[in-house]
Amino acid sequence: MESPDLARMREVYARDGLEESAAGDDPLVLFGRWLDDAVTAQIHEPNAMALATSTPDGRPSVRIVLLKGLDESGMTFFTNYESRKGGELEANPRAAAVLLWHPLQRQVWVEGPVTRVASDESDAYFHSRPHGSQLGALASPQSSVIADRATLDARYEAAAESHGEGDV
């Protein structure tokens, strides 16, 4: 298999620059404008972000999650508290995230402390998800090794039998 010449791959980013005067004083307001631009441009999943966490001894991990809220208090995303991500945030409640919008030649990078949302907000989000997504969350032991696909499928079927539509 012939590999592409990765060292030669480079895009020249010549679209709009960012002038300090245009950025404004509040980075959250600028972030919100750029997110609105990404939504307006119909970028696929403009709220997808790479979220980096680490263990208390500094071992990093990163994965893609979806930004579900942005306001004056910060950014909101949801996670299974028993996942690797949830455990790392419990032990070391700091994270970094990057949202990348290639067509707009923009990215946003943030870092800082992470706190849990109120349980009623977390529950409301879970119940707003499609039924199949709820069942998948119940069936999947996130960040854990499973024996095989058949085991996961059986767990999903058991969750579906136990929880009808609107009953999760």
Image (cartoon, helix red, strand yellow):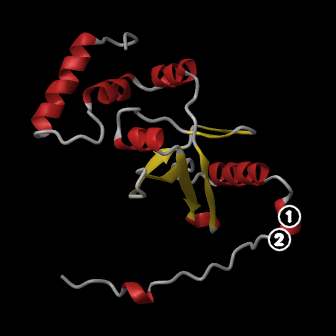
Above or below: residue 2 compared with residue 117: below
Assign a secondary structure to mark 2.
loop
- Quadrant of the image containing the C terminus: top left
Taking the spot 48% from the left edge, 45% from the top edge, the residue there is: 92
Q: Quadrant of residue 101?
A: bottom right
Above or below: residue 124 compared with residue 116: above
Above or below: residue 130 compared with residue 99: above
Decide which of 24, 157 is in the foreground and name it: 24
Residue reaching furthest front? 57
Q: Is residue 96 left or right of residue 106?
A: left
Residues tagged 2 and 1 counted as in contact (Cβ below 8 A) = yes
Above or below: residue 102 compared with residue 75: below
Decide which of 45, 142 is in the foreground and name it: 142
Q: Which residue bears the numbered disc 2?
A: 19
Q: Quadrant of residue 118?
A: top right
Residue 22, label in figure: 1
Q: Is residue 149 left or right of residue 120?
A: left
Decide which of 32, 103 is in the foreground and name it: 32
Coordinates of residue 83 in the picture (x, y in percent): 35, 38
Q: Is residue 68 left or right of residue 40?
A: left
